[in-house]
Image (cartoon, rainbow, N blue to C red):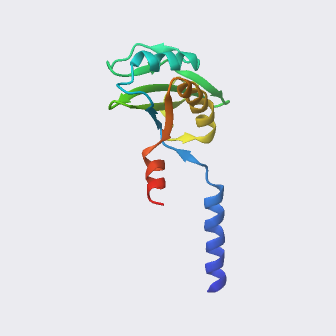
Amino acid sequence: MHKNLLAVLILTLTVIGCSPTLYPLYRDYEHDYHGDVPLSQIEEALIEAGWELLPSSLPNAVSTVNRQIRNWLLYKVVVQVEAVPIGAQHVRLFVHPYRVYPSGSRSKIPFLKRSIRRRVIHDIERVFESHGLIAVGTDMSRDEVRSR
């Protein structure tokens, strides 16, 4: 009995340790100035980070053109980002990753893997900081800190 329990425990710890780190498809930023975050500042920061802007279908959002970040044999990974001011001093950056297959079909990637996060978020975060937008994480990461 104890050997079976020990084997299950070891197997569980191995699976947990080998599972990929997944992040939600957004990140929040806080503006360190008084007043609303101007859309022009968000647009400027995204352009400076190397993203090409699209006309947004929403009046209070900044959208980018899809950018290819990986090219595997079976599919390409493309990402689009959207930045939306929330309240007076916050901006939420949504990341929309897709797999694009040779047939032209697409499938949404439901989470941010570490490699996608590194290729997308880190450059934007660096530029956002220079524009006074400081990363405050996600709701989940803030809740995790609060519960400690």
Residue drawn at x 53%, y 26% is 128
Asked which quadrant contains residue 83, the reply is top left
Left or right: where does residue 31 sit relative to residue 58?
A: right
Q: Position of residue 81 (x, y in %)?
A: 48, 26
Q: Residue at the front extreme? A: 34
Q: Looking at the picture, tell me which residue is in the foreground, 145 or 93.
A: 145
Left or right: where does residue 13 sit relative to residue 135?
A: right
Residue drawn at x 46%, y 21% is 42
- Compared with 38, 16 (above or below) is below
Disc tally is 0
The quarter of the picture where the N terminus appears is bottom right
Residue drawn at x 64%, y 28% is 70
- The answer to whether residue 114 shows anywhere in this view is yes
Q: Position of residue 129 (x, y in %)?
A: 55, 28
Left or right: where does residue 23 sit relative to residue 69?
A: left
Q: Looking at the picture, tell me which residue is in the foreground, 50 or 98.
A: 50
- The answer to whether residue 75 shows anywhere in this view is no
Left or right: where does residue 45 sit relative to residue 90?
A: right
Q: Position of residue 49 (x, y in %)?
A: 58, 20
Q: Position of residue 40 (x, y in %)?
A: 42, 15
Residue drawn at x 56%, y 30% is 125
